[in-house]
Every structure is written in structure tokens, then in C-alpha cells.
Amino acid sequence: MRAKLQRPQTIARNIVVMLRNVLERIRKPIIDGVETKSIQGVRKVDDEYRSYTYIKKDPDFSHLLSRAKYRRLYEEVGTVDANKNPVWREEWMNYFRPLPGRRILELGSHNGCNLLYYGQEGFEIDGVELSSSLIAIFEAHKKQLPDEVQNRIRVFQGWIEEFFTSDRYDYVLCTEILEHVIDPLTVLVKAEECLKLGGEVYISSPEERCGNNTHVRGVPPNELKIWLSQARLSPIKLWVEEGRTFCHARKDLL
Ligand SMILES: C[S@@+](CC[C@H](N)C(=O)[O-])C[C@H]1O[C@@H](n2cnc3c(N)ncnc32)[C@H](O)[C@@H]1O
């Protein structure tokens, strides 16, 4: 008789425990420190995006249809706090090992992280950059370097696609640029044009599209191979590592 009475009690207790567990799970994101932090983190990112006019978390690529809008987007990139301090990024520059005394050109030089780094390493390096707000950050940091370093670094403001120079370089850097531009082939054609015969372009880009709307595509190796051949550049080494496509390619033909 007792056993019969206990069974419904046990069932009831189990139901209560189960409901408690379910409630616990529902409440966990609110009461658990880590979970709460991640919700706040997402809110913080959302708030940050709300404060931008052109930078969007969503894949809004309308800037590709208007050069004025495209330029304004990259002016806004220069107002983002995270971009105010130029940081050389080992994760994509690691495989770029320029020989001493060689000249470097960077297409899309951002806040000058590579210009400042390689300039201090003793290289003559030029950059092409559209955004005057990013160039202003670069200039402010450049000013703090010794004159002999400053004299090795130059930046040209404007569109890569319209950049013209009679100088020819040993290396052209296309790091983290092909995923942004209107037409990646035009940028590679420009890289080829600026290289000396035998000079090399160094490329790094995410293999698949990721991040905010400044990334308009991924750069998978198969597509990159086609663009390189159309730009008359011969891949020396092309590989993917941790979701990033890397390539060294050479200008073999005049
Ligand atoms: C992700 S950043 C490049 C990062 C840098 N090359 C590095 O390796 O750290 C892309 C840069 O290209 C610039 N950019 C994008 N499209 C451009 C264009 N068509 N002409 C000139 N600069 C451009 C942007 O303003 C931005 O500073």
C-alpha cells in the first residue's frame, strides 16, 4: 500500500525536478555570469553598429554601386576605435619575407600598420589608400618615428584602380583587400602593372566571406587562380590555412 502511495509522490518529485531543470536552463543565460556577459557583448556590438551610418553587420553591399557611398564607408572605417592604433598582423603577414633592400608597394594600406612596420624594418615602402581618416591615423603615428624612417614611407591617397606610378616595385602587397573591392581582377592587374619583371605579389584574404559589409566576397583558391592568370601573374605558392587564402605570385611576362 505504501509502495503504491510512494510511486505517485516519486513521479511528482521527478516532475518537479525536471521542471526545475528546465527553468534553470531558461534562466541560465540571465543569471549565469558568462552567459550574461555574452548577451551584453552582443548588445554592445549591436549598439556599436547602430552608431554607424555605412558600416553594417548585415550583407548590405549597396556601396558597390556608388563610388561616393563606397568612399564614405571607408571614411567611417577610420572613425572606428579599433582602427585608431595601427597593429601589424602576424596572422596574415607571417609568410611575407621580403629580401633586404627591396621596394614594397601596398594596395589598400589602411591605417599604415604595414607601412610603419616595414619602414622601421629598413624597407622603402609606399601605400595606396582611399580613406583620408585612415591616412590621418597613419600620419599621426608616422610623425613619431625618426626622420630616416619617415623618409622611407609614403602614402598616396586615392583609388587603387586609378593609381598611376612610373615606379616599379619588387613586392606588391594585396593583403586583406581583394575581399573588399568592387572588382578584384582590376586590383591584381594594377599589382602586376606596378611590379618589376620577376617581382612578386603577396596575397592574403579570407577564403569565405565573413565579417561586416566591408567584406563583399570570400577569396577561394580556385577563383584566385583564374584572376591571377587573367592578370598575367604566375602563382608560386597558393594555399589555404585556417580559413585564409594565401598566395605568392610572380610577374614573369612583360
Ligand atoms: C582590410 S584593410 C587592408 C589591411 C592592410 N592591407 C593589412 O594588411 O593590414 C582594406 C583597406 O583598403 C582600403 N580600400 C578599399 N577599397 C579601396 C580602393 N578601391 N582603393 C583604395 N583603397 C581601398 C580601405 O579603406 C581599407 O583601409
Image: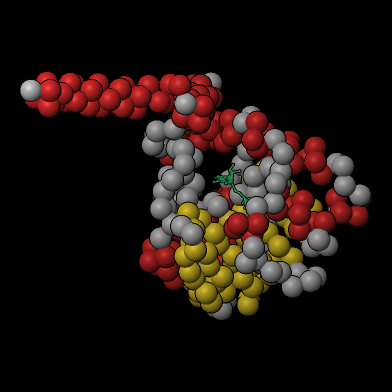
Image point 47% across, 50% down: which residue?
179
| In the foreground, 4 or 145 | 4
Q: Is residue 66 left or right of residue 115?
A: left
Farthest front residue in view: 1
Display colour scheme:
secondary structure
How many dots with numbers?
0
* Residue 203 seen anywhere in this rendered image of the structure: yes
Residue 68 appears at what percent x and percent y?
Answer: 51, 32
| In the foreground, 185 or 85 | 85
Which of the 4 image quarters holds residue 6? top left
In the rendered image of this protein, does residue 138 appear above or below residue 253?
A: above
In the rendered image of this protein, does residue 243 appear above or below residue 214?
A: below
Q: In this view, does 241 lie to the left or right of 110?
A: left
Which of the 4 image quarters holds residue 223? bottom left
Image point 49% across, 46% down: which residue?
180
Residue 19 appears at what percent x and percent y?
Answer: 25, 23
Residue 113 appears at what percent x and percent y?
Answer: 71, 48
| In the foreground, 5 or 208 | 5
* Residue 194 seen anywhere in this rendered image of the structure: no
Quadrant of the drawing holding the N terminus: top left
Image point 52% across, 74% down: which residue?
237
Quadrant of the drawing holding the C terminus: bottom right
| In the foreground, 86 or 140 | 86
Image point 59% across, 66% down: which residue?
201
Q: In this view, does 212 lie to the left or right of 117?
A: left
Residue 238 appears at what percent x and percent y?
Answer: 49, 71
In the rendered image of this protein, does residue 235 appear above or below residue 36?
A: below
